[in-house]
Amino acid sequence: MRSGYVAVIGKANAGKSTLVNVLVGEKVAIVSPKPQTTRDRIMGVLTRENYQIVFVDTPGIYRQRNALTALMMKTTELTAEGVDAIVYVHDGHAGIKDDDIALMKKYMACGLPMLIAYTKIDIMPKEQLPADAKKLFDAGVTADVYPVSARKGMRVKQIEQAIADMLPEEDAIFPENVISDRSEKFMAAELMREKILLKYEKEIPHGVAIIVNTFERHENGTYEISLDIVCEKKNHKAILIGKQGAALKEVASFARQDMEKLLGAKVYLTVFVKVREEWRDSARLLKEFGYDSEE
């Protein structure tokens, strides 16, 4: 049997979390079209008869703007040092730039087995793929390139097998029924943040943290969840709440529906909005909110 840890690395919005979700067959990471959707290192476990792949989904490579994004980039770099193989996810629709080549070579230099998942082929001209493959080869990028569309399920089986082939011969790391290392409480918070990313524009979603105060399962099987949406400015709080609370009610309703799918039970959700100015640059608040640089 083959098994091991695989770092899933790439620029923001390359499609890393979507690919992991599709390969694992369950939603283990939230997705949105905005940068910084993934803030934490999240494991998704795929177990087959002959192999087990432990995907480690990482924050997208992103220019550092504050202490939070610095921690995110540190998480990505540390992940690349402690795995058995690397899947570098590249947005094929965006073409190949010099900095893409530089990043690919950087992770190839780690000395680990690596392949390139060339994503979003369903929304790009077909003739672009061979031209980009030649450009990578000419630039000295020797990792195998696998064109794939996770959203459409195109060539997913091929890349899954290629990833498994990179792993060492080892026993399974996790029991067969495990699909993620993250708790239901963590996923409930992430689902709330996902809906905020999808609904609100500009800087507001990136300045939000979700703090779960109550996560209880009652004897009748229902769940009681209470959480805080923490933002950085008073005017952001007003926008999050909306006129007569309409915006907050809408986003909370969408989040609750997904929480009920996750938990398989009725959820009673209570949401508050609080302001903590410049929390993304506060080491104390970052740790309090669960973004611990020591992890």
Image (spheres, helix red, strand yellow):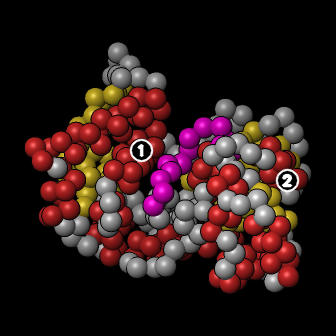
Q: From this viewpoint, is residue 85 visible?
A: no
Q: Position of residue 236 (x, y in %)?
A: 20, 62
Q: Say if the magenta span includes residue 32.
A: yes
Helix, strand or loop for the magenta stretch, by majority = loop
Amino acid under disc 2 = Ala
Specify start and end residues of the magenta stretch as a single range.
22-34
Residue drawn at point x = 55 percent, y = 62 percent: 13
Residue drawn at point x = 38 percent, y = 78 percent: 66
Q: Are marks 1 and 2 in contact (CB under 8 Å)?
A: no
Q: Position of residue 228 (x, y in %)?
A: 25, 49
Can you identify the residue that label 1 sits on?
191
Question: Few, some or many C-alpha atoms within 10 Å of disc 2 (few <14, some 14-19, many ≥20)?
Answer: some
Can you identify the residue that label 2 sits on?
162
Q: Say if the magenta span includes residue 225.
A: no
Question: Few, some or many C-alpha atoms within 10 Å of disc 1 (few <14, some 14-19, many ≥20)?
Answer: many
Q: Position of residue 120 (x, y in %)?
A: 66, 56
Residue drawn at point x = 67 percent, y = 80 percent: 97
Does 126 sit above or below residue 140?
above
Amino acid under disc 1 = Leu
On screen, residue 274 versus residue 218, left or right, reads left
Q: Describe the element under mark 2 as helix, strand or loop.
A: helix
Q: Position of residue 25 (x, y in %)?
A: 65, 37
Does 229 sit above or below residue 218?
below
Alpha carbon distance from label 1 to label 2: 31 Å
Q: In terms of sequence position, does the residue under pointer 1 or pointer 2 come before the other? A: 2
User: In the depicted view, which residue is nearer to us: 219 or 256?
Assistant: 256
